Amino acid sequence: MTITPEVLQPIAARLTDLLENDRLPHALLLEGANAETRKEAAVQLARVLLCARLSDDAPGDEDAAMFGGMSLFGADTQEEDARLLPCESCKHCRKTTAMAHPDFLFLEGDTAARSFHIDAIRQMRQDARLLPNEARQKVIILHQAQSMTPEAQNALLKLLEEPPDHTALILTAPARHMMLATVLSRVAVFSMGENCEEANNEQQTRVNETAQSIANALAAGDAYTLLCLTARLEKEKDKEFVRQCFAQTRCALHGQLRGEAHESRREIILMQMERVRALEVAMDRNPNQALLLSRFAAAIYR
Ligand SMILES: [Zn+2]
């Protein structure tokens, strides 16, 4: 992976200020831009934090060593965009480049929603509490943190509430609103730039995947799967997301109807489309989505 210093440019001024004053928070969230840029920025920042310029004990200069003081931005260059540069030659830089530094942990969910599981966070939490091996601090990146399950985010919360002094956490997500509010309140958010497109695309992908699963369960009369899906939606805080899922479910069922030749199957699909439509109408009138959803799921047994 090539990391350019420019990747930190949108947040360089603020980062530099915090580092110079030794006030970098224990947990950061990088939002915006695209996933690859966020990843590069997170790794670049990790390399800066682990580099010997910042990381090793400087004899007789204990205070400056923790976050580098001016030594990090020293006489090498006065250029604005060259400030947040790791030295590239110390053992820490060489090991982070090879993604093999014992105090550097990189975790990510895959692109699917809720693919970042609690087990990974629990394991990370244990790691985070251990003292660093070689550097002055551990740096842990949680890339695509928005794909954490709510359970995983709650597990992360325990670490954020009592962050170990020697650990820096760098989260990335397309947009801050994709994280639980409790997590958000304990991280410092850094905006990398415009992000709406990706956030919307990811949201649309989630809607489509959920809708397809619901449509399949309805058409197959699969009560168990339907109950699991609606139970998850009952906990969803974004009510508009739930609405979109069911509007899309009706479209997915309509697609199945067109491909279905058997009359009895067509009747089932039509009936399920009617039920989804009724649910949408009910959700317009009744704000208690959770109740409507559990009734909707239970009715499949009739
Ligand atoms: Zn270095």
Image: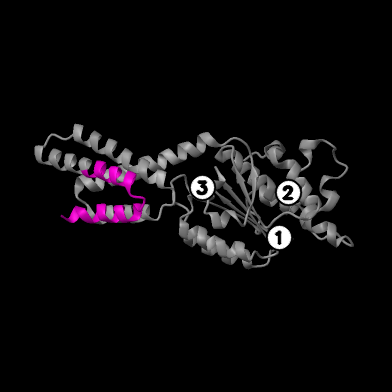
Residue 239, above or below 102:
above
Depth-wise, is mark 2 or mark 3 nearer the camera? 3
> Which residue is labeled 3 in the image?
178
Question: Judging from the image, what secondary structure is the residue with disc 2 in?
Answer: helix
Sequence-wise, the earlier of marks 1 and 2 is 2
The quarter of the picture where the C terminus appears is: bottom left
Sequence-wise, the earlier of marks 2 and 3 is 2
How far apart are the two marked residues, 2 and 3, measured between alpha carbons?
A: 27 Å
Sequence-wise, the earlier of marks 3 and 1 is 1
> Which residue is labeled 2 in the image?
48
Question: Judging from the image, what secondary structure is the residue with disc 1 in?
Answer: loop
The residue positioned 35% from the left and 52% from the top of the image is 289
Q: What residue type is labelled 1?
A: Gln
Q: Which amino acid does label 2 sit on?
A: Val
The residue positioned 18% from the left and 56% from the top of the image is 301
The residue positioned 57% from the left and 39% from the top of the image is 36
Magenta residues: mostly which secondary structure? helix
- In the rendered image, residue 126, in percent from the top left (x then y), is placed at 57, 67
- In the rendered image, residue 206, in percent from the top left (x then y), is placed at 41, 43
Whether residue 124 appears in magenta in the rendering, the answer is no
Depth-wise, is mark 3 or mark 1 nearer the camera? 3
Display colour scheme: one colour
Farthest top residue?
258
